[in-house]
Amino acid sequence: MADQILSQEEIDALLTAMDSGEIDVVEEKQEVAVEVRPYDLTTQNIMQRGQFDALEEVYDKFVNLFQASLSGLFQRTISVKVISRETVKFGEFIKAFSNPTGFIIYGMEPLIGSALMAFEPNLVFSLIDCMFGGEGKPMEKIREFTMLERRMLKRMAMAVLKDLETAWESAYRLRLALRKIETKPEFVYLVNPSDQLIIVVFAISTESFSGNIHLCMPYLMLEPIKDQLSSSFLREKDRASSFGAEIRSLLGRTEVNLVAELGRTVYSVEEILNFEVDDVLRLNTGPQNNVVVNIERVPKYLGMPGVVKGSKAVQITETIDPDRGRG
């Protein structure tokens, strides 16, 4: 240990050599290992909180509609509720299902692409059993769907799509149409396996059976209308609707002057001073010509003069656009 300690003479010699440049002073830098993680710019795993808040309203309305439809169809109390909402990759999602499963592929025009509805097999058999008067007890062994069962599955899918289309009216008007029914997961293709799906799972239950329905929409499908589904848009819409109702109420009680102009003519002051009782004034319009209807002295409509129940009246025939002329 003592051999490793420099004496004062050695220290002075070392400092002198450093000052004279005989010894190069090199500062060693320790390289810090940086972890590099790959990032795929094409991934849709970029959804922000509040981006699709309008879907909450859609699915809450759908639950109420679908529960009423099922209860009416089967003449028994059926509970429907949302049990989960998540985003997963399509490849991971489709691997979770077995054969057979009731896959319903449907369109949501004017959106591009297809969405997916998945009925768990036990639920399909239970609902079909209820349709034919049974209690809906689950089957002991899962088997392939028969042609009759596929037709009944289609009937149930149409009922779901009808209620879902009605529920979507609260956020965005869409036309839902069934495109295809599949039972094997390997034959179902919506998007690339790495693309994100928005998954909402609904639990259907009675005293005798229970099962889930999965509603799946690709993120890319909803991206064109994501602004209309955001929380900020909902706030603006609620604010606009509240003010709109108040404005309509105020306008409904507003009185305006409405004048139907039968025609025009031009006379000099001298001619006007010479008018006498029973004189007839010639106008520039006849009984077959439109008259101009003014609101607060602004031309708004064209109409035909006539008589209704003994009173003089004007039938509106056209709208006058102040910017483009007649509408």
Image: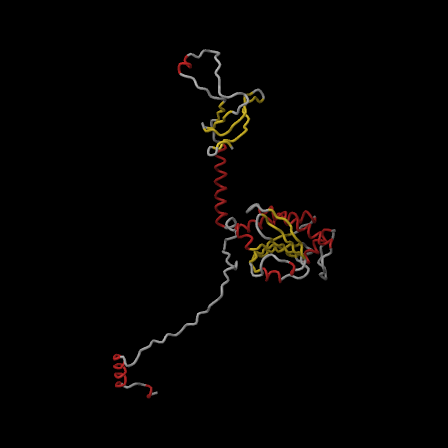
Determine the residue positioned at 28% across, 81% down: 22
266 versus 209 height, above or below = above
Horizontally, is 252 left or right of 61 in the view?
Answer: left
Q: Nearer the viewer, residue 220 or 227?
A: 220
Q: Where is residue 171 in the image (x, y as percent from the top left)?
A: 55, 47
Determine the residue positioned at 25% across, 80% down: 20
Determine the residue positioned at 52% across, 51% down: 226
Determine the residue positioned at 49% across, 23% down: 261
208 versus 306 height, above or below = below
Q: Which of 71 and 258 is in front in this view?
A: 258
Q: Where is residue 154 in the image (x, y as percent from the top left)?
A: 68, 51
133 versus 7 height, above or below = above
Quadrant for the N terminus in the image: bottom left
Which quadrant of the structure image shows residue 188?
bottom right
Which quadrant of the structure image shows residue 25?
bottom left
Horizontally, is 109 left or right of 22 in the view?
Answer: right
What colouring method underlies this structural image?
Answer: secondary structure
Q: Where is residue 66 in the image (x, y as percent from the top left)?
A: 63, 49
How many marks overall? 0
Q: Is residue 66 visible?
A: no
Q: Position of residue 200 (x, y in %)?
A: 59, 55
Q: Can residue 28 be seen in this view?
A: yes
